[in-house]
Image (cartoon, rainbow, N blue to C red):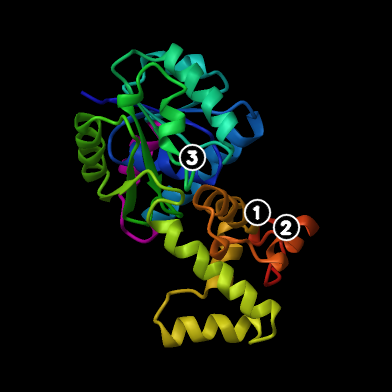
Amino acid sequence: MIQTVGIVGAGTMGSGIAQAFAQAGYTVQVVDAVPAALDRARTGIEKSLGKFVEKGKLQAAERDAALGRLSFGGAVDALAGADYVVEAIVEDVEVKRALFGTLDGVTRPEVILSSNTSSISITALGAATRRPERVLGMHFMNPVPMMTLVELVRGQATSDESMRTATDLCARLGKTAVEAADYPGFISNRILMPMINEAIYALMEGVGSAEAIDTVMKLGMNHPMGPLTLADFIGLDVCLAILEVLHQGLGDPKYRPCPLLRRMVAAGHVGRKSGRGFYVY
């Protein structure tokens, strides 16, 4: 019976995932080594839940109850009593593997350890533990409280039982689970990132302005936002990291990151979070 959920990483994704579990009635422990990140997460969740109340999607009492189910701390040891864990830290395979090794030692042997990674091998993360059958990918979409999709990724050793547990958990969160195999980028980024990359090539080659490219995809293909706006929203550094995983993992030149993308990331123009990407914010 899953009652307490541990979230490692209090960034945008981690705090969104924490909010989703707290709203669904779970006791949530958020862990991050950076105190400022925990403060930002707490403030961000309060603000997000407040918007739900303003829009009439949540009662004030429900908001207060959700906030009451959340706790924040800096030590992974706090997750010793967790019934399920979601990792949402930096997209770096070695850092993640080290964390999974630590979580394996801290949590009970039957606890499922999941990763919110958008492209890194679940099999590699599972291999860092003594419970690879209980390691899986649980890739939420941003912004987590609004987006209903969760991409569930089965590693080489992930058991059917673990996948069923994660699928049931998604249903209780009001999310739709879609299973993907453990290939670089899974389903979502295997398709999305080459589209974004091609849009950047089109911009670099002068095929159209950023506004023209985004308008074509919005009005012509009915996308809610254009690929360059979306790239700014995701973070150009994140897009580059995922494309590099695709390029390295699949070995196909079609995944080669656009030189303009590399240049913008090198300049620190990584999108909304830096105030400048393909657009100025």
| Residues at marks 3 and 1, CA–CA distance in whole angstroms | 18 Å
- Taking the magenta stretch, the answer to whether it contains residue 67 is yes
- The structure residue drawn at horizontal position 57% and vertical position 83%, both measured from the top left corner, is 213
| Residues at marks 2 and 3, CA–CA distance in whole angstroms | 23 Å
Whole-percent x and y of residue 183? 41, 47
- Mark 3 = which residue? 14
Give the extent of the magenta segment. Answer: 54-68
Foreground residue among 245 and 225 = 245
Q: Are marks 2 and 3 in contact (CB under 8 Å)?
A: no
Disc ID at residue 237 = 1
Quadrant where the C terminus sits is: bottom right
- Earlier in the chain: of badge 2 and badge 3, it is 3
Badge 1 marks a residue whose secondary structure is: helix
How dense is the environment of label 2, judged by Cα within 10 Å: few (below 14), some, or many (20 and up)? some
Badge 3 marks a residue whose secondary structure is: helix
- The structure residue drawn at horizontal position 42% and vertical position 48%, both measured from the top left corner, is 49
The kind of residue tagged 2 is Val
195 sits left or right of 281 in the view: left
Q: Are marks 3 and 1 in contact (CB under 8 Å)?
A: no
77 sits left or right of 133 in the view: right
- Earlier in the chain: of badge 1 and badge 2, it is 1
Question: Compared with residue 151, is residue 18 higher up or lower down, i.e. above or below?
Answer: above
Q: Are marks 1 and 2 in contact (CB under 8 Å)?
A: yes
- Mark 2 = which residue? 265
Image depth: mark 2 or mark 3 in front: 2
